[in-house]
Amino acid sequence: MDIEISNSKFLNIFGERLKYIRQQSNLSYRELGKRCDLDYSYISKVEKGERNIQLSTILELAKGLEVHPKDLFDFSLSEQNPVK
């Protein structure tokens, strides 16, 4: 990944990764929100790169998705290399 990445680009890449893992887990926004005690609309906005996110929230999302937090940052993984 390019070190000169902008904040907005990083948020978009992170959001795409979160969405991919959520979909691979067969979870809706609402289901993940319930698991993490987060509003489903917030998760949607994170996935779209519209919201910044705190590390503590990333940890809660990882727990809700039953993945290691580092998996949310492994942008090199593609659909051919799923997390689970």
Image (cartoon, rainbow, N blue to C red):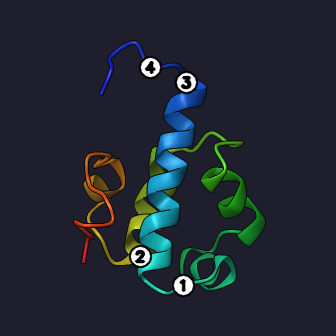
Vertical order, 45 against 63 (above or below): above
* Badge 3 amino acid: Asn
Marks 2 & 1, CB-CB < 8 Å contact = yes
The kind of secondary structure element at disc 4 is loop
Question: Number of labelled discs?
Answer: 4
Dividing the picture into quadrants, the one containing residue 1 is top left
Residue displayed at 77% across by 65% down: 41
The kind of secondary structure element at disc 2 is helix
Q: Identify residue for label 1.
A: 27
Q: Identify residue for label 3.
A: 7
* Badge 4 amino acid: Ile
Marks 4 & 3, CB-CB < 8 Å contact = no
Can you tell which mark lies on residue 5?
4
Residue displayed at 70% across by 61% down: 44
Q: Identify residue for label 2.
A: 65
Q: CA distance from mark 1 to mark 3?
A: 27 Å
Residue displayed at 56% across by 40% down: 12
Residue 25 image position (x, y, % from top left): 42, 83
Residue sitting nearer the eye, 19 or 46: 19
3 left or right, relative to 64: left
The kind of secondary structure element at disc 3 is helix
Label 2 or label 4, whichever comes before in sequence order: 4
Label 2: few (<14), some (14–19) or many (≥20) C-alpha neighbours in 10 Å = many
* Badge 1 amino acid: Leu
